[in-house]
Image (tube, grey):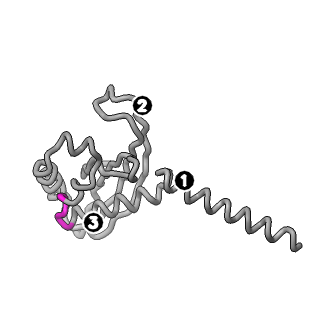
Amino acid sequence: MKPFLPRFLAACTLALASSCALAQDGNSADELIQAGLSSLKQIDENRAGEIWDTASAFVKTRFPKAEFVANTQRSRQTVGVVARRDWASVTRIRYLDDSTGIPAGLYANVDFATRLTNDKTVFEKVSFRLEPNGWRLTGYIPRENQ
């Protein structure tokens, strides 16, 4: 029984290290959900300027900070007072070239079903691009229908 325990512990350690490596490579849905919730909290708190500061580089080249902040605030005003947010889906998309007008790379959309204090449900999509320093926001889209 003794020889089994060290091998078992080594296997557990290896499995844990592998799962940490995956999370660092942007493969964790939990990582994306947390990034989405964090971004939504900043949007709720009218801190879109801080989001722009850490947004994907290509977003900064396409939208001046003032325009990004104004668009985000205008979009958020359509939502209302949030009672609860639950993630509905996480979708990853790899663009191989920039023929679509979007730089090549790994992107992700995190969709939330957002319950408002008036019992209405809306949907909020937060989009990200995986960059060398982690997931960086590329967009926020609230909508009434899924």
Q: In this view, which residue lies farthest toward the top?
A: 99
Helix, strand or loop at disc 2? loop
Picture residue at 47% right of the left edge, 51% below the top: 26
Q: Position of residue 74 (x, y in %)?
A: 13, 54
- Between the C-alphas of marks 1 and 3, the distance is 26 Å
Q: Is residue 113 left or right of residue 78?
A: right
- Identify residue type, mark 1: Leu
Per the image, the residue denoted by label 2 is 96
Q: Position of residue 41 (x, y in %)?
A: 27, 65
Helix, strand or loop at disc 1? helix
- Identify residue type, mark 2: Leu
Per the picture, the main secondary structure of the magenta-coloured stretch is: loop
Picture residue at 54% right of the left edge, 53% below the top: 22
Instruction: Verify CB contact (< 8 Å) between mark 1 and mark 2.
Output: no
Crowd around label 1: few <14 · some 14–19 · many ≥20 (10 Å): few
Q: Give the magenta-colored segment's residue range.
A: 45-49
Question: Which numbered disc covers residue 22?
Answer: 1
Picture residue at 24% right of the left edge, 64% below the top: 42
Q: Is residue 82 above or below residue 49?
A: below
Q: Decide whether residue 79 is among the magenta residues.
A: no
Q: In this view, which residue lies farthest toward the right?
A: 1
- Identify residue type, mark 3: Lys
Picture residue at 87% right of the left edge, 69% below the top: 3
